[in-house]
Image: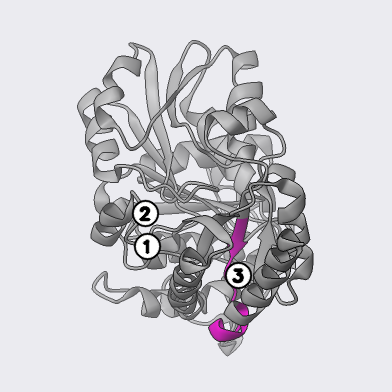
Amino acid sequence: MSSSKRVETKLIHAGELRPRVHGAVTLPIFQSATYEYGGEDDYHDIRYIRLNNTPNHTVLHAKLAAIEGAEAALVAASGMAAISTTLLSLLSRGDHILLQDCLYGGTHDFVTKDLPALAIEYDFIDASDPASWESKICKNTKAIYVETIANPLMRVPELAAVVEFARSHGIVSLIDNTFASPINFRPAEMGFDLSLHSCTKYLNGHSDIVGGACIGKAVLVKNVTRKLNHLGGTLDPHAAFLLHRGLKTLALRVKHQNESALKIATFLEKHPAVGGVNYPGLKSNPGHASAAKWFDGFGGMLSFELKEHDAEIADQFLKELHLPICAPSLGGVESLITRPATTSHLGLSKEDRKKIGISDALVRFSTGIEATDDLIEDFDQALKKISARAVH
């Protein structure tokens, strides 16, 4: 497919098998663990489900690479399978990595609890302060890792500076692009070496699978693929089919979620019962100028705290809501709401959460595709009930 095609078109047509399988408009599920030997002379080219090369895998690989404007892509059994396998393909004993200080809890846990056992060193950096990074670089530094929109405080790093820093030091630039999705930001276009995704979230969009992806330079993706082939974190064909189906509506879903989240964040920012809102689409947000410059949309994720900075009051507020489901994860068609201290960042100690600005009362909201006004009305009635209780 021509690289000039827009992302909405690539989501539907990129990577699809030609000719179609027996004329089927939808790619079938290839529920076969093994395939006839075709003369392959490399172990990783043998057609076998664990080697990530069934038709369900290869179509996804081509489509994901196309929508981010990258050379290659790979799907994995989960977002953490993609993240951990990528890091293990880049780092070995004695190596060092720099990472944004505010990260998804699973990534933070893997780095702080698993990498040291492999004699791999790490340092956290303030991703909004490029001048401070130089003091953390070491002779054995191999990579720098950030999130497009940090979970759960919605901070936007100095992304262009990350790419330039990596190039100037000859290290690999990695970015978790889950929160933005390829609709809002395509890391390869800025020059990032590898982009990572939890496909469980926006890419699939229906809260019915787990999956992950690594997208970027072909030589690096090849190395990650070989590591994944040995570790075995392969995406099941049926999950691949559901991800393939979900991708086709990605642009429609994310554009609505962008618009809806901005309206909800604006409402919350003005509400007297709300103490503060984290959303890059708000002009009051420290990362707004950068997000407006680099992104095509500000995403469907936001977080906030009530005026009463109390975890129990936050829980009461969650119980008063009718539409958002109180559950972990994000990026689905249904709105989800949670306290990160009890879900995504439960693995961090209270001290570590406090150090990076995640209070126990912080609420994270994933905007679904419900009517925006209905969500705002629901937030309003819940906030009024909490406020009334505070008065009494």
User: Between disc 3 and disc 2, whose residue precedes?
Assistant: 3
Locate residue 385: give its quadrant: bottom right
> Distance between the Cα atoms at labels 2 and 1?
5 Å
Q: Amino acid at mark 1?
A: Leu
What number of labels is visible? 3
Front residue of 95 and 259: 259
SS type, badge 2: loop
User: Between disc 3 and disc 1, whose residue precedes?
Assistant: 3
According to the picture, the residue beneath numbered tag 3 turns out to be 205
Q: Amino acid at mark 2?
A: Asn
SS type, badge 3: loop
Front residue of 64 and 349: 349
Locate residue 390: give its quadrant: bottom right
Residue span colored magenta: 364-375
Residue 367 shown left or right of residue 144 in the figure: right
Residue at horizontal 49%, vertical 23%? 91
Does residue 285 belong to the magenta stretch? no
* Up-down relation of residue 89 to residue 157 (above or below): above
> Distance between the Cα atoms at labels 3 and 2?
27 Å
Residue at horizontal 35%, vertical 60%? 185
According to the picture, the residue beneath numbered tag 1 turns out to be 282
Image location (x, y in percent) of residue 144: 38, 31
SS type, badge 1: loop
According to the picture, the residue beneath numbered tag 2 turns out to be 285
Front residue of 98 and 356: 356
Q: Is residue 238 visible?
A: no
Does residue 374 belong to the magenta stretch? yes
Q: Is residue 316 visible?
A: yes
Residue at horizontal 47%, vertical 64%? 269
* Up-down relation of residue 391 to residue 141 (above or below): below
Image location (x, y in percent) of residue 62: 44, 63
